[in-house]
Amino acid sequence: MNVFFCKEGLSLLALRPPSPHLLGMKTRLFCLICVGLMACGGDDDALTDAGTDTGADTGMDASEDAPPGDPSFVASCVYENPFSMEQDCKEYRGPGWSMASAEADCGDVFLGAAGTFAVGECDLPSEVGRCTVGEPGTAEGYVLVNSGDPGSCGAAGSACEGFLGGTFVAAPECSSCEPSETEGQPFIPWFQDCREPLDDTPGLSADGQVCTPTIISGSTEPGRHFADYADCDVVRAQRPYYAAPSTVEMDPEDPRLDDEEYMAELEWLTSQAESSACVCCHSASRTPEGPAVWDTEAGPLWIDTVSDEALAMLGGYTDSAAFGFLPADESNGFDRSTTGLPTTDRDRMLAFFDRELERRGLSREDAEAQPPFAPFFRELIEFEPEACPEGIGMDEDGSIRWTGGGARYVHILEPGSQAPGVQPNWDMPEGTLWHIRMDPEAQAMGCGMSYGELPENAIQVIPEEGDAPALVSGQQYFLYVQRDIAQPIARCLFTAP
C-alpha cells in the first residue's frame, strides 16, 4: 500500500512519481512537499488515503441517519487506492459518527474523491492491517483498513504510526519479508548534474560547466533557472507532487505595483526561488500539471499565493532543518539551513519576509507560533530505539531479520547514535558502522541477508571501502531498516551473537 496522509496540516506520501530513469512505470501525481509548502486540500482534519470516485450510489438517504450518540453505529467507506491499485476501507464507529456525517466523509474522502458507502464493518478480501486513528467512538476517531500483498505491510504500518499517529495492528500475513509487487517509484539519491551553460556566461565549475545538486533542497547557480540545469522529474521522485493552482485573486491596482523598492526585492526573491528546486513544483511552466498552490509565475505579486504557514517556513521562522540541506559551498552558495527557501543572502531574505509579515498584520511571534514544517522528519532523527521484538534483529548465524516487507536501506549503528533521516545530511549519522542501499532501478531486498554480505543489486555506502566492521559478541547495536527513505519498518536494538 502506497498511501498519502496529512497530519496537522502537513503532508507526506509513500509513493513518488516515476523518473525517466525508471522506465515502464505509470506516472501518478499527488500531493507536494517542496521546500516549504504542503499542498493539501480538503478539511483541516487529518486526511486519509486518496480515493477515486467509484460512481456507485449508496442507496442511503441522510434522513435515515442513526440517532446522535448511538454507540452501536458502524459504517464503512471502500475505495480504490490509486497508488497501490488495491481497495482500502475507512470504518466509522460509535456515538461520534452518524449516518449523515459518515456518508458525507465518504463522499469526499480526499480532494473531492468519493468511495462506496455502506452500513456495517469493513470487510476486505486481502487485508494487511488496521490503523486506529484518534479516540475510538469520537468524530475524529476511525479505523483505516488496508489491503494488498504481504509486502505492503511495512508501508502501511509506518504510514499509520509515523504520519497519522495511529496504532497499527498487522494481519498474520505480514510476517512475510518478500518485497511488494506494487512497490512504486523508489527514492532517487541526489547527485551533481553538470551541464554546459545555456548562455555565453561560463559556469562556476573549473571547466565552465553549471553544476547543480539534483535534490529537493538544492539550487543551481544564482541568476540561473534550476529546471534548465537539473531534472525536475528526479526531484519529484524525491518528494511527491500534486497540482493545485492557487485561487488567490490579485488586485491590478495594488499599490505595491508602484513601489519600486518593494518590486525590486520581490524580483530578487523570485530569482532566488527559481534558482532552487522549488520550481519543480511551484512554477507553472515547469510542472507536469500545474503548480502546487504557490506559483512564482502567478503574476508580479505571486507572493500572495504563499499562505501564512508557508511564509513562516520559507522565511525560517519555523524550523525545517530536518527536511535536509546541503552546505552552501555544495549548493552554489545557497544556504537552506536556517530558512525554508534556499538563499545566498539570509539577511536580505529575512528583511523581505519581515516586511511581508507586517503587511499581513502578523508579527515574528505569530510566524514562530506556526506548527513546524514536516514534524515527521524531525521525529525520525529523534527516535529512541528499544530492544528488538521477537523475529527482528540478528540470528545466531549473523543473519539480519525484519518483518513487514522488502527494504531498500539498512543501517547498523552503534547504540546511542542518532537515527537516520533524509538526504542529504541526515541519512548517514555519526556512529553508522554499516550502511547499504538498493540500486533505485532494482527491486527491494527481502530479509534473511547476512551481516556484511551484499544482496544482489545492493550498494555498500559505509564503509566506502573494505568489509563491514566485526560486531562484538554480547554488545548491543542499533538496527534501522527502511522500506525507502523516511519509511522505517524496523528500528530497534539487538545483541550481537
Image: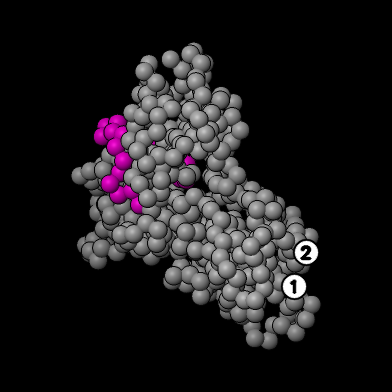
Quadrant of the image for the C terminus? Answer: top left
User: What residue is at 37 percent from the left and 41 percent from the top?
Assistant: 457
Corner quadrant of residue 131: top left
Residue 200 pos. (x, y %): 65, 76
Residue interval drawn in magenta = 162-184
Q: Disc 1 to disc 2, how far (Cα)? A: 9 Å
- Position of 444 with respect to 118 (left or right) is right
| Residue at the extreme bottom | 253
State the count of labels. Answer: 2
Residue 6 pos. (x, y %): 47, 53
| Residue at the extreme front | 207
User: What residue is at 71 percent from the left and 83 percent from the top?
Assistant: 257
Disc 1 marks which amino acid?
A: Glu
Q: Is residue 172 magenta?
A: yes
- What residue does disc 2 label? 348
User: What residue is at 49 percent from the left and 50 percent from the top?
Assistant: 189
Task: Between residue 168 and residue 221, name the one nearer to us.
Answer: 221
User: What residue is at 53 percent from the left and 53 percent from the top?
Assistant: 191
Task: Between residue 411 and residue 115, name the one nearer to us.
Answer: 411
Q: Badges 1 and 2: C-beta atoms under 8 Å apart?
A: yes
Corner quadrant of residue 19: bottom left
Residue 52 pos. (x, y %): 31, 62
Residue 203 pos. (x, y %): 65, 66
- Position of 462 with respect to 395 (left or right) is right
Residue 108 in view (yes/no): no
- What residue does disc 1 label? 265
Residue 317 in view (yes/no): yes
Disc 2 marks which amino acid?
A: Arg
Task: Between residue 197 and residue 276, name the one nearer to us.
Answer: 197
Mark 1 surroundings within 10 Å by alpha-carbon count, few (fewer than 14), some (14 through 19), many (20 or more): some
